[in-house]
Image (cartoon, coloured by chain):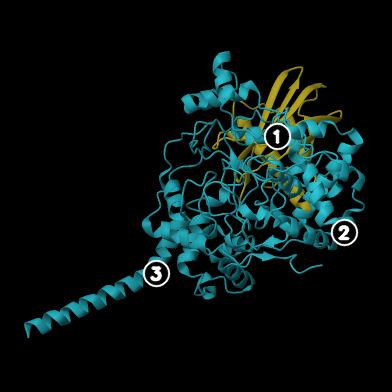
Amino acid sequence: MTLKLIQFLLGLLFCAALSRADSLIFPSYQIAVEVIEPKGNPLILNKHQTLLVTLKPQTSLALEVLDFRFDARMPQHKHGMVTKARVQKVGSLQYRVEGVRLHMPGDWLLEFIITDQKGQTRIEVPWVLTAS
Amino acid sequence: MKAQQLSRRGIALSFATVVGLVAVRFWIIQPASQEMLLKEATGNGALDFVKMQRTARTFQAEAPHLDDTDRKRAVLGRALFFDTDLSKNGKIACASCHKPDKSFTDGRSKAVGLSERPKNTPTLINSFTSFWFYWDGRTDSLASQSLNPLEDEAEHGFSRAELAQIIFKKYQSQYETLFGKLPVGLITKLRLPAKPTKEVTLVSDNVIRFAIASTVNPKLIRDLGSLSFQTTQAQLRQYRSKLSYHSDQDPQSVSSINYNQLTEPEKKQLNQVFANIGLSIEAFEKGIVAIESPFDAFIQRWSRSSDPKPQAHFSKDFGFKEFLGFQLFLAKASCQTCHTGPYFKDNQFHNIGLSSVDDSLDLGRSQGIKTVQSDPFNCQGAFFNSPTRRRSESCKDLSFLDSETPEAIGAFKTPTLRNIAETAPYMRDGRFSNLRQVLEHYNRMDTHSGVGFREETLKPLNLSETELEALKSFLESLSSPVKELTQGTT
C-alpha cells in the first residue's frame, strides 16, 4: 500500500519534472499528492476520491500562495471530470481537494493551478487509467 | 447415363453446399487464421495470453450481499412489485414494464404505462451494482427510483395517499413487522388522491442556449468550449417548451390540493410510508441477478487455471468466435471504455450523438443532475440518508455534480450489456430492433445529430463481417438465467 503511494508520488514528481520543458509549465513548485479518501489508493478509475495536496516552493523566496485550484481533463476526449472538484485550504501550503472522479479509462491530465505573488503557475501531470 | 451423372453432380454440389453452410454456421476457422484474427483484434502485437488471463480475472462478477433486513423487506417488495392495485386503472404494476421473462424489460421500444413514455425500459438485472437510475440519472438509489413511476401520470398514475391506503388494506401486518405502526388515523382520513406537486428545477438558460447552438454547429461550439451564447427571449421560450423533463403534475390538480391540506407532521408521516414502500421494492430488486452466463463460466474456468491459453477452456457455448468477440470488445472496438468491468457498465453518462426521435429537446444528464439534486428522496434528504447510503458513490458525487458542464448536455447512462440479447429493442428510445443494427451503427458512426458534444473518441469501428459476427456472439454469450435471490424467503 505504502509502495503504491510512493510510486504515485514519484510518478507525479517525475511527470512534473518532465513537463518543465513545456512553455506552459512553470517549475516553481514541487507537488505531493496523497489520496486520503478512500485511504491508501493511487488515483484510480471511476471512484470518488479526496486528495491532500502539499505544495513546496522550489525557491528560497517566501511565496504566499494566493489561490490553488485542481482540475483534470482528458485532452483526447476533449472533456474533463463529471464532477467539479472543490479545494479547501487545510495548512499553510496544504489543500484538501474533494470531489475528484476520473470516470473514464484513458489519458488524463491532472492540473494544479497555483497563484502566488509572481503570477499563475500551471503544472500539468499526465495520468493514465486503464479499464481492466 | 447423362441424367445419372447430372444427378450425381447435383447431389455432390448440394452436399458441398451443406458442408460449406455447416462450416460457416459452426465457425470453422483454421488455427492460423484464428491467430491472425486475434492479433488484429488486440492490436497486431504478439498474443500475450498471460496478460489476457489477468485481464479476464477482472471480469468475475459477484452476487450481492443481502442481509436479513433485505430478505424480509423483499417479501413485501416483491408483492408490491407485481401488484396492479398500485395504479390508477388497477392494471399497471412495476412488472408491467419490468417483466421477469424478458430480463425485467418489456420488449417495447418505449415503455407504456397508462400512456407511452419517451424512453426504453432499462433492465433491472444486477441493479444492486448501479448508483444512478433512469437514463438521465435523475435518482440516486433504487429506493428513490422505485417511487417515481408510482406517481407518474403516464405510468401508474397513483398517489402516495392511495398507496398508503393499499398498504393499510392489503399489507398492514407485513408492513408493521418491518417498519412499525402504520399511521392508521391519518390514512383513514386521507382525501384521495393526494401527492405533492412535483417541483423540478430546470437547467439554466445558459444550458438551453448551449444545447440550441450545438444543434446548429457542434464543431464550432465545441471549439469555443463556452456556455455563453446569445439567443432571443422568444427563441429561449420556444426551446424551453420543447424540453423533455419530468414534471407531470398540475399544481391545481385535486391530488396537489388534497396533499396541501395536510399538516406538516401529517405530510411527514405519509412520506415515511411512501419511503418505506421504496425500501421494500429496492430490497426485492437488489436480489435480481444474472451472472451465470457462458461468458462467466468461461472466465471462471480460465481464471482458475494454470494454463493461460484460452482455447483449453472453451466450451460449446463459449468458443473461439465468442473469445474473438471478447478481445475485440476490449481492444479494437474499445467497447469497454464505457461498458466497463464485470457488469459491463460504468455508471456514468456519455453523449453518443444519437438524434432526438421527435421534436423535443432532451438534455439528458444535464437535466438529470438538476432533478436528482432537488429530489427530496435523495441520499441527502430526510428519508434515505443512512450512513451506508451517504457512503455510496452517487451520494459522494451528488453535491459535486454540475449541470452546466457541457459534457452533461445530451449525455445518457451507459446501459449494462448483461443479458443484452434478451432485452431488445436497443438504445434509449428503442430505435434498433436487434444487436446487429446496434453494431452496424457503431461500425459506421453516422454524423452527429444530437444535442451537445458527442464523445470525441467515438469513431467508426470499421470491423469486418467476421469481426461484427464475433462481437455479436460475444454479446450473446453474456446471457444468463435471471435469479431472484430473495425469492422464497419469509
Q: Residue furthest bottom?
A: B1
Label 1 vs label 3: CA separation? Answer: 49 Å
Residue at 16%, 79% in the rendered image: B9
* Residue type highlighted by circle 2: Ser
Q: For numbered disc 3, what is the local secondary structure? A: loop
Q: Is residue B344 above or below residue A84?
A: below
Label 3 vs label 2: CA separation? Answer: 58 Å
**Residue A45 seen:** yes
What residue sits right under mark 3 in the picture? Answer: B27
For label 3, the crowd category at 10 Å Cα-Cα, with few meaning under 14, some 14 to 19 and many 20 or more, is some
Q: For numbered disc 1, what is the local secondary structure? A: helix
Tag nearer the camera, 1 or 2? 2
Q: Colour of chain A?
A: yellow
* Chain ID of residue with mark 3: B
Chain represented in cyan: B
Label 1 vs label 2: CA separation? Answer: 35 Å
- Residue B371 is tagged as 1
* Chain ID of residue with mark 2: B
* Residue type highlighted by circle 3: Trp
